[in-house]
Image: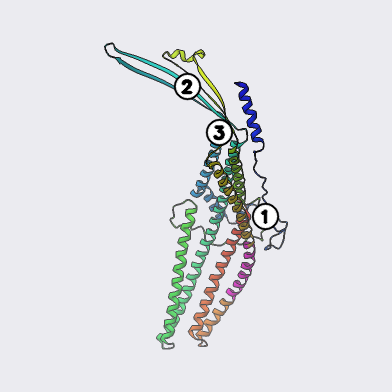
């Protein structure tokens, strides 16, 4: 019998030698497109990317809020829990590499009645054990374990990506809130200035120096500025509450410590395009999931190979508890088995096709993620250049409109221009100021997008 088992094992080895497969060797640079030597949107190459971007803004309030969000945000805590679940699943899938041993102890007590002979009672004690173990000769179970481990690593990397994304959202919301408050101040100042003009026109109308149309146009302009002020105040409360949710706080609409926009940090060093593949968490996670899909496909392919199992069972049973510890009373058996799939109705073939399709999906998803990552970097680099030029132009526009507004007031008081020209000068000043604040905030938000696209840490 023992010789027969040895023969079966040898046969199984010979059958499987030609059918075993291993997962392919993947290269992280294989994205289906050529990677350039430097960014098209960057003027210099061979630079080291900024690792920790948060402190570059030199804003203590921003730094404190980001760290508060990282500690208290519930979405981030949920992502951390997913990491724990993925690690536990990897442990579960790896448990089949080890023998599974079970032990059960039972006690049975019964009463039997015999007609005419009364009743009798008896009790029985029993202790049973069972052992089952599939010998992972071809590495099928090992592939499943490694695949689950890769997926757990990918989930942990997802947490890193979620952490960076949260920091970026907090920073961008911080800038939006600061802009909304500044826009509100600009609207309030413009409203006060328009109120002075309205009083001036009202007095001139009462003295019969201007037409009623001039007064109506002035009051209409004043009402429009007041509406813009209310819109800025509403935007302030909307952004405030959104930011409070990111911080894990109740949305009461009170973040008084935010009142100004920080200065844009110095020009960022973007590093080399090839470095992005090994730095961005979402790319690393996508590549890990591709390797996990390869391992699952390898495991599925090995379903065609024989399975070698070891099964053992035994135990003892007695009406005397003391007999249970007597090793001579134990009965047991051991079975070494081999199972070779012959016909499964297409199940194994279907599982292989399914795994192949999932692997192809993971491969194309990785390539798509990589190309989108490169797009985000190039887009942010190019946007910064154009936004800087736009900021310079708008700064000049603010200076020019402020000077023209003063001249328009002087000219109107001396009867040199019509009311429409005066009101237009105020509108031009207000529009230039609001546009300048908006582009300053866009520059800061775009810089955050660039940091995030490059995979910079906090």
Residue 265's place in the image compared with 435, above or below, is: above
**338 in magenta:** no
Magenta segment boundaries in residue numbering? 379-399
Residue matched to label 1: 49
Image coords of residue 431 (percent x, y): 53, 73
**398 in magenta:** yes
User: Toward the viewer: 386 or 8?
Assistant: 8
Residue matched to label 3: 96
Marks 1 and 2 sit apart, C-alpha to C-alpha, by 63 Å
Of badges 1 and 2, nearer the viewer stands 2
Marks 1 and 3 sit apart, C-alpha to C-alpha, by 44 Å
**Residue at image location 52% in from the left, 44% down from the top:** 82
User: Toward the viewer: 88 or 10?
Assistant: 10
Secondary structure mainly formed by the magenta segment: helix
Does label 2 or label 3 sit earlier along the sequence? 3
**Residue at image location 62% in from the left, 65% down from the top:** 383
Image coords of residue 442 (percent x, y): 57, 64
Secondary element at image label 3: helix
Residue matched to label 2: 128
The answer to whether residue 145 of the structure is visible from this angle is no
Disc 3: CA contacts within 10 A as few (<14), some (14-19) or many (>=20): some
Horizontal arrangement in the rendering, residue 318 relative to residue 13 (left or right): left
Disc 2: CA contacts within 10 A as few (<14), some (14-19) or many (>=20): some
Does label 1 or label 2 sit earlier along the sequence? 1
Marks 2 and 3 sit apart, C-alpha to C-alpha, by 22 Å
User: Toward the viewer: 148 or 347?
Assistant: 347
């Amino acid at each position: 019998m023992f010789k027969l088992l040895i023969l079966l094992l040898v046969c199984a080895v010979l059958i499987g030698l030609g059918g075993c497969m291993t997962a392919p060797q993947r290269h992280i640079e294989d994205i289906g497109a050529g990677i350039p030597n430097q960014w098209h949107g960057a003027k210099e190459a061979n630079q080291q990317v900024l690792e920790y971007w948060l402190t570059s803004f030199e804003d203590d309030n921003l730094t404190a809020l980001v760290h508060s969000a990282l500690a208290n945000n519930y979405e981030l805590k949920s992502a951390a829990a997913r990491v724990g679940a993925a690690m536990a699943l990897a442990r579960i899938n790896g448990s089949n590499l080890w023998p599974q041993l079970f032990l059960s102890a039972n006690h049975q007590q019964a009463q039997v009645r015999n007609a005419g002979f009364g009743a009798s009672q008896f009790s029985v004690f029993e202790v049973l054990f069972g052992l089952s173990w599939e010998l992972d000769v071809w590495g099928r179970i090992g592939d499943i374990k490694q695949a689950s481990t890769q997926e757990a690593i990918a989930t942990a990397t997802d947490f890193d990506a979620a952490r960076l994304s949260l920091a970026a959202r907090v920073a961008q919301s911080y800038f939006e809130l600061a802009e909304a408050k500044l826009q509100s101040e600009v609207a309030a100042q413009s409203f006060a200035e328009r109120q002075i003009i309205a009083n001036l026109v009202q007095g001139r109308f009462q003295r019969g120096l201007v037409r009623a149309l001039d007064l109506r146009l002035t009051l209409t302009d004043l009402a429009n500025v007041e509406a813009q002020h209310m819109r800025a105040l509403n935007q302030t409360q909307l952004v405030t509450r959104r930011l409070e949710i990111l911080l894990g706080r109740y949305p009461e609409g009170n973040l008084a410590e935010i009142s100004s926009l920080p200065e844009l940090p110095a020009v960022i060093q973007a590093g080399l395009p090839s470095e992005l593949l090994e730095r961005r968490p979402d790319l690393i996670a996508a590549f890990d999931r591709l390797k996990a899909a390869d391992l699952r496909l390898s495991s599925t392919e090995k379903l065609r190979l024989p399975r070698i199992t070891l099964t053992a069972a035994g135990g003892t049973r007695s009406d005397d508890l003391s007999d249970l510890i007597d090793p001579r009373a134990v009965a047991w058996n051991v079975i070494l088995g081999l199972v070779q799939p012959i016909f499964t109705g297409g199940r194994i073939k279907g599982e292989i096709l399914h795994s192949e399709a999932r692997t192809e999906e993971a491969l194309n998803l990785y390539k798509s993620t990589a190309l989108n990552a490169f797009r985000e970097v190039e887009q942010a680099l190019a946007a910064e250049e154009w936004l800087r030029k736009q900021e310079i132009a708008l700064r000049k526009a603010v200076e020019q409109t402020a000077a023209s507004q003063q001249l328009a007031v002087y000219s109107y008081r001396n009867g040199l221009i019509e009311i429409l020209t005066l009101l237009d000068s105020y509108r031009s000043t207000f529009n230039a100021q609001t546009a300048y604040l908006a582009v300053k905030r866009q520059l800061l938000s775009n810089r955050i997008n660039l940091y995030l696209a490059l995979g910079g840490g906090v």
